[in-house]
Structure formats: C-alpha cells, structure tokens
C-alpha cells in the first residue's frame, strides 16, 4: 500500500465517524435533496451543506455531485451512506438498550411487519405491551419480508416479522429464513386457503369437500380444496413470494395457473374474487384481518405459512425486544385458539340468501 493510500485510509479511520455528519449524509441519501434532509433533521440548509463539505474534506473523497438543480451521491457517497445507516442504527439500539438496562425507561423496540400481521397479531401484541409495560415505546413499520430484512441488517429496526411458505411437514421442525447473522423464533404456523366466489346452496361447489382430519392437515369436517378443478379459471397472484407459492401449488395439482391480476393487497384480492374475476390463495391471517362477505374458502392440504420474528446479531437481546417477541407469540397463540366465524355464502343473482358451512 503506497503512502497516498495509507494517508487516505488513516483519514477515514480517524475522522469519518462524526455521528452528526453521518446522520446528515444518510438523510440526504434518503431524500435526495439538501432541502428535504434539512427539514427532517430540523437544520438550516446551509448547515446541512456545511456538514457535507466537512465530511468530504475529512475523508478526502467526493461524496456528492450536482445533478440538474439537485444533488446525487457519488459511488463513494452511496457506499458511505449505506454503512453509516447501519452504524447509526446500531448506535441508536445501543443507547436504547443501555437506557433500559439502567432502568431509565421500559425501553424502545422497532418492528417491521407485513400487512396481514399488522392487521391481526401486531396490534394485539402492542396492546399487551402497553398494558404490562406502560413506559415501553413500540414503533411499527409496514414492510414485506425482503424490505424488512434489509431494514433489520441496516439497523433501522430491531425485529423483522417475516414469513415463509412451506409444503407438508418440515423435517426437524420449522426453520427461520436463512441469513448471515439472523436469528429467529417461530411465531405462527398457519394454513393457506383457496378463495373462491361464494355460491348459493342450489349451485353447490364440487371443488371443495370435507376433510377426514389427517395428522397435520385440516380438522375433520373442515372444507379442503381441489385445485385441479380450477385449472381453467383465471387466478389472482400476490407478492413475489406468494406468486411463487401459488405456482407451486398449482403445479402440484397438475397445471399452470392463468394469472390475470397481481396485487399484494389482500382486501383487493378478495374483492376481485367476490366479483367473479378470478380465484386466489390467501393465508389465514389475511382472512382474519379482513374478510369479504361474498367469498368462500377451503384449506389447501399441506400448504402452510410460517411466520418468524427475526433478529440480527448476537445475543444478549434487550429486554424490550424479548418482551415484544413474547407478546407476538402470545397474540398468535390466542388468535389460533379463536373460532373463526363461518363463511357467509353470497346468493347467486336472483337467488335467496343462504348461509353455508
């Protein structure tokens, strides 16, 4: 390594970790403008520009460049901003953990979760924590699993609630999604359902039938789906992971689905199904969060979705993090013990309304 390189590396090691300037850089990277960054940080614009200039001088690297009327990060700027976000996340977490350890507060914990969890088990868990630990600060963010994992690695959150689709029993029990430094606890093992438009009793629905109650499958008497009967129908797919799961399920049934609509909004999925525009599959949480009165569901044999609470880094965990995960598990257990209300079958056009099983 030559003298100039040594000098450059030494400059970064000694001067780069000014927390205030790192926060400014991260804010600029997030918003793409000095004005928006200043607004977020409650700084004057000249102050933001000054911190950026000082950071460039201290590191000896050009971090921003003009782009029209605005600015954008250079490659070095993007690299530093990514690492700075992770550093700041860890610093914030350390401050929170120390405060909780010292008994100054009940602690703060940040959670990212996917929509159907935010509509079911997350509010129940947050309510439990508010009752048991009134001083605890729980912060929630909506994010699908890929984004939640990125936020977890960057230190923006403390816990990521994610899911994984599986088929049949998993040897050795459910395993958390893989990832370097990731640790997880299973929160929920839920079924996946075929969702179709409700029919009157006169029409019937021969694509579903009662289960015999096999081990690990639907309970006896509960309706189970025969996907092969829907091979010629149009399908509604969800997020990327859900789409892959749908294609896998249909492949096991011997056909490739004709996907006509794609949306990760489970309310919209049910509305499309209820309007007769297609059929879909949805996990149990999506149906518990909001259920359209004009749909009918049948459990897919062997199809499950495992929900995990993931953490990043080595233990020990903060008391607030442990309390949150315990509350999520408790809320999920309570939810699965509740009796789901029966399907309300919508009448066909001109037919009387009936309530089906």
Image: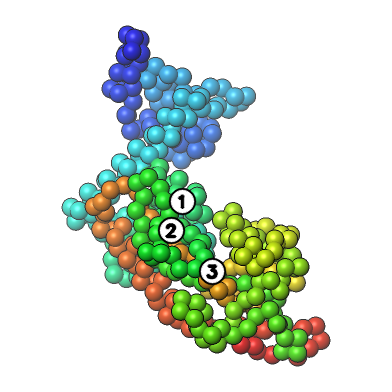
| Residue closest to the eye, 61 or 221 | 221
Report which residue position mark 3 lands on: 303
Q: Position of residue 45 (x, y in %)?
A: 47, 30
- Residue 46 visible: no
The CA distance from mark 2 to mark 1 is: 7 Å
Judge left or right: residue 29 versus residue 235.
left
Ranked by sequence position, the earlier of labels 3 and 1 is 1
Q: Residues within 10 Å of mark 3 (few under 14, many from 20)?
A: some
Closer to the camera, 35 or 179?
Answer: 179
Which label was assigned to residue 161?
A: 2
3 or 1: mark nearer the eye:
3
Q: Is residue 177 above or below residue 41?
A: below
Question: Quick one: label 1, few (<14), some, or many (20+) residues within 10 Å?
Answer: many
Q: Circle 2: is it few (<14), some (14-19), or many (20+) Cα within 10 Å?
A: many
Residue nearest the viewer, comparing 183 with 337: 183
Pointer 1 residue: 148
**Residue 70, above or below 102:** above
Question: Can you tell which of label 2 and label 3 is closer to the viewer?
Answer: 3
Q: Quadrant of residue 276?
A: bottom right
Q: Quadrant of residue 351?
A: bottom right
Q: Residue at x 49, y 68 (%)?
A: 168
Name the mark on residue 37.
Answer: none
Is 320 situated left or right of 292 in this image?
left
Helix or strand or loop: what does disc 1 sit on?
Answer: helix
Q: Are marks 3 and 1 in contact (CB under 8 Å)?
A: no
Please report contact status of discs 2 and 1: CB closer than 8 Å, yes or no.
Answer: yes
């Amino acid at each position: 390594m030559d003298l100039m390189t040594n000098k450059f590396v030494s400059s970064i090691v000694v001067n780069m970790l000014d927390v205030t300037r790192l926060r400014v850089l991260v804010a600029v990277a997030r918003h793409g403008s000095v004005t928006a960054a200043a607004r977020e940080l409650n700084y004057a614009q000249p102050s933001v520009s000054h911190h950026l200039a000082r950071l460039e001088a201290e590191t000896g690297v050009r971090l921003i460049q003009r782009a029209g009327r605005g600015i954008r990060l250079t490659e070095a700027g993007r690299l530093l901003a990514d690492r700075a976000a992770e550093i700041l996340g860890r610093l914030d977490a350390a401050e929170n953990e120390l405060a909780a350890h010292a008994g100054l507060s009940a602690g703060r914990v940040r959670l990212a979760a996917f929509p159907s969890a935010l509509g079911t088990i997350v509010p129940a868990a947050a309510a439990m924590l508010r009752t048991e630990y009134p001083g605890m600060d729980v912060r929630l963010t909506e994010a699908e699993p890929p984004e939640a994992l990125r936020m977890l690695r960057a230190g923006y959150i403390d816990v990521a609630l994610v899911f994984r689709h599986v088929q049949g029993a998993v040897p050795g029990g459910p395993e958390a999604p893989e990832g370097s430094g990731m640790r997880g606890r299973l929160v929920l093992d839920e079924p996946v359902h075929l969702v179709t438009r409700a029919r009157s009793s006169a029409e019937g629905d021969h694509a579903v039938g009662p289960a015999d109650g096999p081990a690990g499958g639907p309970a006896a008497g509960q309706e189970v789906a025969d996907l092969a009967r829907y091979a010629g129908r149009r399908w509604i797919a969800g997020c990327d992971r859900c789409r892959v799961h749908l294609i896998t399920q249909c492949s096991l049934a011997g056909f490739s689905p004709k996907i006509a609509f794609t949306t990760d909004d489970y309310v919209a999925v049910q509305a499309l199904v209820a309007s007769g525009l297609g059929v879909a599959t949805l996990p149990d949480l999506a149906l518990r969060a909001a259920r359209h009165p004009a749909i009918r569901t049948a459990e897919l044999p062997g199809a499950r979705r495992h929900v995990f609470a993931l953490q990043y880094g080595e233990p020990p965990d903060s008391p607030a993090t442990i309390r949150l995960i315990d509350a999520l598990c408790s809320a999920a257990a309570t939810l699965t013990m509740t009796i789901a209300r029966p399907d309300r079958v919508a009448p066909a056009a001109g037919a009387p309304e009936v309530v089906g099983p």
